[in-house]
Image (tube, grey):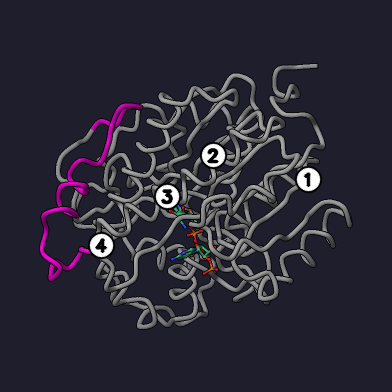
């Protein structure tokens, strides 16, 4: 057996994925299933997400996927039942703040959620691996508006600016919601590592830090184009107005993006690769201005009407020097990929089901 075939959890064993209906959760489940693992996915409303079970059981067999409902994810013990007998946990779900939620309230809710999941995992002897979905926003912003000058990112980098701004900034700030989200990811991930230091669990913990995930919808009809997939989808649909307010409040000029498949595969590496232990796996991917995405679509689909007035390159966008990026790319290569999927590949994949 080669190193890449060795697995830190038994081949064919079951992995728990929290928030399995989400863009990231569904793709983590899909990549685990494609490599022969079984998945138990939690959602808040099982009835609404039957399509997920139909999709995965259709693709991977009737015993491959179980959908379980965990309605109140903050209730202590909420994940105890779902945790039974799993060898690994991909803790993907977070609590996205509503427009009236204060930052402290959001941070406290996420802390409670994360401790629930960790406590259930610690009480289940079969758990050998735990991966936490963080975000590159936990380390340093990927927003081109906020970047000025080359910035080096190491495994020790944290987004102190977002934490500071979330705590002290004004609710009227245009990027208030994004600051609170970014700080929630930084504090959430720091909370995971603090818990590990304090509790010294018998399972290995890793984290994954993706930037904006783009790529193909798993099921254009039933899943549609959720979360960040909706942004390139709005370009190919020539319907930028449907997302422009949200984009303006987060990343007006553009940011960094990564293929959803690569982000999901890094979760699989964190769960199964014996060499990945106590690591933060970074996935910043490619810098882009919004017009770069339209330009790619214009080349591939020359007859489509596309937005012509998106923010375009006016400076060097590649301002981040992400030192741990090579480690993530090497893990993707061990899993049989030539490296990161290119910007063009992921943007074109994002149009699948729309053209
Ligand atoms: N998408 C990206 O580009 C990206 C990049 C980096 C990291 N991430 C991380 O990946 C994870 C999933 O994000 P996503 O973009 O894939 O999400 P998504 O597709 O928008 O789905 C959101 C998920 O979060 C749940 N959720 C939202 N608000 C909630 C609340 N108040 N209480 C409980 N559950 C709530 C939703 O449950 P319901 O369906 O029941 O509402 C759903 O499962 C998050 O941890 C996010 O920070 C995402």
Which of pointers 2 and 3 lies earlier in the amino acid sequence? Answer: 3
Q: Which of the pair 110/146 is nearer the observer? A: 110
Which of pointers 1 and 3 lies earlier in the amino acid sequence? Answer: 1
Residue 127, quarter of picture: top right
Label 1's element? strand
Left or right position of 258 against 42? left
Q: Which residue is mark 2?
A: 119
The magenta-colored residue range is 152-176
Q: Which residue is mark 1?
A: 38
Is 171 magenta? The answer is yes
Mark 1–mark 4 Cα distance, whole angstroms, equals 40 Å
Q: Which residue is mark 3?
A: 112
Residue found 36% across the figure and 50% down from its top: 256
Mark 3–mark 4 Cα distance, whole angstroms, equals 34 Å
Viewer-nearest of labels 4 and 2? 2
Mark 1–mark 3 Cα distance, whole angstroms, equals 27 Å
Q: Position of residue 236 (x, y in %)?
A: 49, 74
Q: Which residue is mark 4?
A: 253
Which of pointers 4 and 2 lies earlier in the amino acid sequence? Answer: 2
| In contact (CB < 8 Å): disc 3 and disc 4 | no
């Amino acid at each position: 057996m080669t190193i890449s075939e060795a697995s830190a959890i038994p081949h064919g064993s079951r992995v728990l994925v929290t928030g399995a209906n989400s863009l990231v959760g569904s793709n983590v489940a899909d990549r685990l299933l494609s490599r022969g693992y079984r998945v138990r996915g939690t959602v808040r409303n099982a009835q609404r997400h039957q399509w997920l079970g139909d999709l995965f059981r259709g693709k991977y067999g009737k015993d491959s996927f179980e959908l379980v409902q965990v309605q109140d994810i903050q209730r202590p013990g909420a994940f105890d039942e779902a945790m039974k007998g799993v060898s690994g946990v991909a803790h993907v779900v977070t609590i996205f703040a509503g427009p009236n939620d204060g930052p402290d309230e959001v941070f406290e809710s996420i802390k409670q959620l994360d401790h629930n999941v960790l406590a259930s995992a610690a009480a289940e002897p079969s758990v050998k691996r735990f991966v936490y979905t963080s975000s590159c926003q936990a380390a340093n912003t990927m927003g081109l508006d906020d970047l000025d000058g080359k910035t080096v990112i190491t495994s020790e980098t944290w987004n102190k600016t977002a934490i500071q701004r979330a705590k002290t900034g004004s609710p009227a700030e245009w990027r208030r919601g994004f600051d609170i989200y970014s700080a929630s990811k930084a504090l959430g991930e720091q909370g995971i590592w603090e818990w590990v230091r304090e509790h010294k669990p018998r399972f290995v913990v890793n984290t994954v830090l993706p930037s904006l995930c783009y790529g193909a919808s798993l099921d254009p009809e039933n899943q549609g184009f959720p979360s960040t997939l909706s942004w390139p989808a709005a370009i190919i649909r020539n319907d930028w107005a449907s997302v422009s307010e949200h984009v303006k409040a987060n990343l007006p000029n553009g940011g960094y993006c990564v293929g959803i498949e690569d982000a999901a595969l890094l979760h699989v590496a964190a769960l199964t690769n014996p060499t990945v232990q106590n690591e933060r796996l970074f996935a910043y991917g490619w810098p882009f201005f919004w017009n770069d995405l339209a330009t790619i679509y214009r080349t591939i689909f020359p007859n489509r009407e596309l937005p012509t007035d998106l923010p375009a390159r006016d400076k060097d966008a590649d301002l981040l020097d992400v030192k741990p990026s090579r480690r993530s790319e090497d893990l993707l290569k061990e899993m049989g990929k030539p490296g990161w999927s290119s910007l063009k590949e992921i943007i074109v994949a994002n149009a699948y089901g729309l053209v």
